[in-house]
Amino acid sequence: MSLLEKGLILGSLGAIGGYSVYFVLKHRVGRVSTSSAEYFQRRLELLKNPKIKILYSTMTLLYLQGIERNETSGLYDLHELLDLSRPNFVALPISEKDFADRYKQIINTPRYPESMKKLEYFLKTKELDMKQLPDIAEDDIPYLFAYDFCLRKQCKILYADRNRDIYERELAARKQLTEIMSEDGTEVIGTVKNNLNPEEIETEVLYSRREEFYVDTIMNELKPKFALIPSSFHRTIVGLTTPEHLPGISRGWMNKFKSIYGHQILEDSLEAVSYTHLTLPTIYSV
């Protein structure tokens, strides 16, 4: 091997190593461009919203927001949440197909980029003016804003739900089966029994199954993947859901994470942020 070839190999290895260090430090240090005191204050303000949960461990930081899609104050908190956390992933409680069916036409309109710029300004200044956004319905803002944010900030959207028609078919089949078995008093083998009422079926299909799928979608994304260039082990996730699913997803996340990784998930609180004044971990430092 000639000296030139050796030099090229060593130079390539050095370049890869240098970029790897830069890449890791960029994600460990540069996720939150704010001072520790300001970060704590902004985090404290978010925790005043009872529909926001902050769940953390040494591996992940999950911001969960239960948002009503036409709730203006929740939209302002969503803007602050995304701006503060600078997430790697944003989870939406909708399937990719359902998202495309509902929003593809809006996203492809010529006025969409300008509408998103206006929306960013209105949410930042907390002066939402829907008259200036004729192409967007207020209840469409959370998903569209999160989607646009990830396009601009290079985070990944996670479609954390199955197609809506899957649940509707399953729900109809379960109810029909229960009615048939209830007529002749025969018990059904498995999870469906003749004493299961319609409300319990809806709870299992529309709540438990959806919450489990939501958690599994995020967990699958956290699985170690082979890469030539290493990245930070820590992941920040923002998850949007509805207020009624917030407790179930939180419990599911804590239980699943502990069972797979053996890590205890902790929940942030107003008291913890207000009074402990602990030093931020390196991943949150400027």
Image: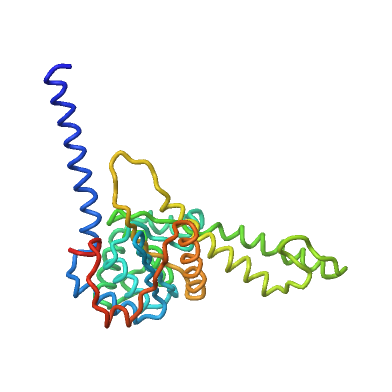
- At a point 82% along the width and 70% down the height, the residue shown is 182
The image quarter in which residue 268 lies: bottom left
Q: Taking 223 as reference, is 203 above or below it? A: below
- At a point 58% along the width and 67% down the height, the residue shown is 208
**Residue 10 percent across, percent down from the top left:** 16, 29
The residue positioned farthest toward the right in the image shown: 184
Q: Is residue 135 left or right of residue 246?
A: left
Q: Is residue 244 left or right of residue 200?
A: left
Q: Taking 132 as reference, is 214 above or below it? A: above
- At a point 17% along the width and 37% down the height, the residue shown is 15
The image quarter in which residue 206 lies: bottom right
The residue positioned farthest toward the top in the image shown: 1
**Residue 63 percent across, percent down from the top left:** 37, 68
The image quarter in which residue 169 lies: bottom right
Q: From where the camera sits, is residue 101 visible?
A: no
In the image, 44 versus 144, the foreground residue is 44
In the image, 259 versus 20, the foreground residue is 259
Q: From where the camera sits, is residue 17 visible?
A: yes
The residue positioned farthest toward the front in the image shown: 262
**Residue 187 percent across, percent down from the top left:** 81, 65
Colour pattern of the rendering? rainbow
Count of picture labels: 0
Q: Quadrant of the N terminus?
A: top left
**Residue 188 percent across, percent down from the top left:** 79, 63
Q: Quadrant of the C terminus?
A: bottom left
